[in-house]
Every structure is written in structure tokens, then in C-alpha cells.
Image (cartoon, rainbow, N blue to C red):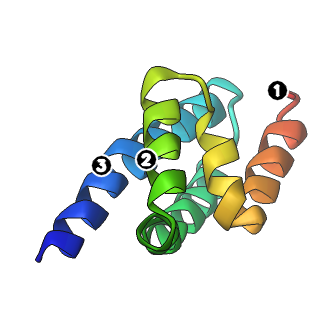
Amino acid sequence: MIQDFLVSLFLFLVVDPALADIRSAMEDAQVPAAVVGQVTECVRAAGPELAERALADPVWGFTTAVSVAIGMTDAQTAIGDVAPGCATAIDSALAAAGAV
């Protein structure tokens, strides 16, 4: 029960804002909607992996959540720690749109 709460809290503090930031950056860069959808699904799929890492390494989870919440770490970096494929997909999409 507490573990489920902590997972939900981590997802709320890290993954949801990360998803919003990434989606906004892609829309600003005029990345096609289909690509935005693919990257969004990648980030959503990485959510449980991020939560598992946060539970396995509470110090990492806490520092990542705080860093993302106060803007010290960008969302892409936090996600790239666990799901490098998503970070690569985000970079590629933004580069293709000329935003990077």
C-alpha cells in the first residue's frame, strides 16, 4: 500500500511534468503529431521503470523528484537515466524539427 503510494507520487512528481515538458518542446518545434505520440508512449512506458528504480534506490528517487520539481534537472535527463531509448527518440525528434 505504501509502495503504491510512493510509486504514484514519483510518477506525479517526475513523469507527468516530464511528459508535459517534452510534449510542449516538441509542439513548439512543430514536430509532427505522430512523432509526438510515439515519444509520449515511450515516456509513459518508462514510467514504471522509473518508479521501480526510485523504490530500489530511494536516494536517487528523492533527488530526481526534487531536481525535476525545482528545475535543476530537465525531464529528458531523468528519463534518459532509466530509458535511454526514450531520450534518443526525443533528441532525434527535436533534431529533425531543427529545435536542437
In the image, farthest residue toward the front: 59
Q: Nearer the viewer, residue 5 or 62?
A: 62
Determine whether 76 is above or below 42 in the image: above
Q: Quadrant of the N terminus?
A: bottom left
- Residue at 77%, 57% (x, y): give it: 89
Q: Name the residue under label 3.
A: 12
Other-residue count near label 2 (Cα within 10 Å), few / some / many at <14 / 14–19 / ≥20: few
Label number found at residue 62: 2
- Alpha carbon of mark 1 to alpha carbon of mark 3: how far? 27 Å
Q: Which amino acid does label 3 sit on?
A: Phe
Q: Where is residue 53 in the image (x, y as percent from the top left)?
A: 52, 70
Per the image, label 3 sits on a secondary structure element best described as helix
Q: Position of residue 95 (x, y in %)?
A: 88, 38
Q: Is residue 96 visible?
A: yes
- Alpha carbon of mark 1 to alpha carbon of mark 2: how far? 31 Å
Tag 3 or tag 1, which sits nearer the N-term?
3
Q: Where is residue 66 in the image (x, y as percent from the top left)?
A: 44, 34
Other-residue count near label 3 (Cα within 10 Å), few / some / many at <14 / 14–19 / ≥20: some
- Residue at 59%, 24% (x, y): give it: 72
Q: Mark 1 points at which residue?
A: 99
Q: Which of 82 and 98 is in front in this view?
A: 82
- Alpha carbon of mark 3 to alpha carbon of mark 2: how far? 13 Å
Q: Nearer the viewer, residue 14 or 21?
A: 14
